[in-house]
Amino acid sequence: MSAWLLILAGVFNIVIWPRFAKAIVADDRAWAGEAWSSAPTGFFWVHAVLIATAMTFGVIVLVIGFRAHRSLRSR
């Protein structure tokens, strides 16, 4: 049961965070001027690090969940 919870949590992170990244890129606070034509602001970088960290942990949790599920099935 806990293996499925880890798989679900990993999938959730992989699905949700890219959508959040798209919203951050479109936010006016992310850029000093026009989007993609000017320098990114601190708002952009803080959220980029947050998203990258959450996605990394999401993939790690997903892999652990798959391995746990696979080990339970082999017993």
Image (tube, helix red, strand yellow):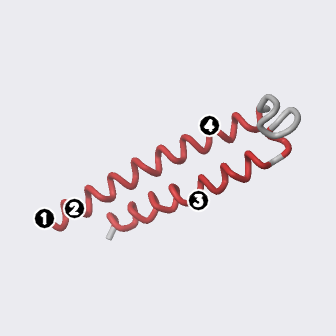
Q: Is residue 71 left or right of residue 16?
A: left
Which residue is drawn at the image coordinates 42% and 49% (left, top)?
A: 59
Q: Disc 4 or 2, which lies upstream in sequence? A: 4
Task: State the mark number for residue 74.
Answer: 1
Q: Are marks 4 and 2 in contact (CB under 8 Å)?
A: no
Mark 3 or mark 1, which is nearer the start of the sequence? Answer: 3
Q: Quadrant of residue 71?
A: bottom left
Classify mark 1: helix, strand or loop: loop
Q: Nearer the viewer, mark 1 or mark 3?
A: 3
Q: CA distance from mark 3 to mark 4?
A: 15 Å
For the residues bearing labels 1 and 4, Cβ distance under 8 angstroms:
no
Badge 4: few (under 14), some or many (20 or more) residues near its Cα, within 10 Å? few
Residue labelled with disc 2:
70
Crowding at mark 2 (Cα within 10 Å: few <14, some 14-19, many 20+): few
Q: Which mark is residue 49?
A: 4
48 shown above or below 1: above
Q: Is residue 10 left or right of residue 36?
A: left
As measured in the structure, the alpha-carbon distance from the residue carrying label 4 to the one carrying label 2 is 32 Å
Mark 1 touches mark 2? (CB < 8 Å): yes
Residue under label 3: 16
Circle 1 Cα neighbour tier, 10 Å, few/some/many (<14 / 14–19 / ≥20): few
The Cα–Cα distance between marks 2 and 3, rounded to whole angstroms, is 25 Å
